Image (cartoon, grey):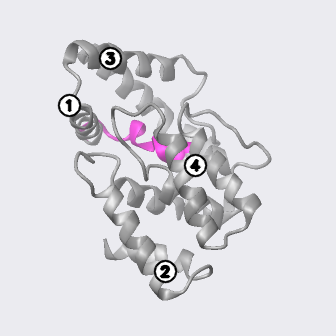
Amino acid sequence: MKWLKSNWIDLAINYADDSTIESYWETIKSHYTSKNRYYHNLLHLKNMFVQLESFKTEIEDMDSFKFAIWYHDIIYKATNKDNEEQSADFSKKALKALKFDDLKTKKVQNLIISTKKHELILTENNDNAYLLDLDLSILGSDWDTYKVYIQNIRKEYKIYPNILYKPGRKKVLKHFLSRDSLFFTKCFITKFEKQARNNLTKEIKML
């Protein structure tokens, strides 16, 4: 928690006073620690920021990229069909209050929207590709870590009985496997692609 807050302050200090930064942090923390957040929580954000350190020189617009990480799951309910759109709208209002550049705010919104179908929206550089790869990197984790991930996802969707959940989950996994590659950037393909395909194939067999 302390590490994440420090990360937030380092970013937001360029756009707001101390009281606003603190207020926004409390809002972020409240959303990501809300009930039924078993995977899409602060730990997910931390994992993304930690991995970002290894390729941060590759990112063209770091502030927009980081704001997109912070806000990409700010709204998350298993029963919603528009979490990404709501999160993008949330980011727009927040960044307007921070007096963040309007064009960059639109970029943040598009980055967030791209996580809905995990398809590139912005192609002028690799920022969008890296964001999507970060968001899905859990798929390429070792099997024990992946098992915890799928258990936490199931908890988030506990409102749905297996007769509904399993076919829906299987459809999503098969969609990812049908792609030429699950990841967009060379470094993520090299590091995670093979393991991710093994994990998804194994989970499908379990469903």
Asked if residue 116 is positioned above or below residue 56 in the image, the reply reads above
Q: Amino acid at mark 4?
A: Leu
Q: Nearer the viewer, mark 4 or mark 2?
A: 2
From the image, tell me which residue sits under label 1: 158
Q: Amino acid at mark 2?
A: Thr
Return the disc, 3 or 4, that comes first in the chain's sequence: 4
Say left or right for 86 vs 14.
left
Confirm whether the magenta stretch covers residue 162. Answer: no
Say left or right for 73 vs 160.
right
Q: Amino acid at mark 1?
A: Lys
Q: Nearer the viewer, mark 4 or mark 1?
A: 1
- Quadrant of the image containing the N terminus: bottom left
The answer to which quarter of the image holds residue 200 is top left
From the image, tell me which residue sits under label 3: 204
- Image point (63%, 41%), residue name: 186
Return the disc, 4 or 2, that comes first in the chain's sequence: 2
Asked if residue 189 is positioned above or below residue 110 in the image, the reply reads above
Q: Nearer the viewer, residue 103 or 41?
A: 103
Residue 14, percent across and down? 62, 81
User: Label 1 to label 2, Cα distance in Å?
Assistant: 36 Å
Q: Which residues are magenta?
A: 132-144
User: Label 3 to label 2, Cα distance in Å?
Assistant: 45 Å
- Image point (39%, 75%), residue name: 5
User: Label 4 to label 1, Cα distance in Å?
Assistant: 27 Å
Q: Nearer the viewer, mark 3 or mark 2?
A: 2
Return the disc, 3 or 2, that comes first in the chain's sequence: 2
From the image, tell me which residue sits under label 2: 20
From the image, tell me which residue sits under label 4: 131
Per the picture, the main secondary structure of the magenta-coloured stretch is helix
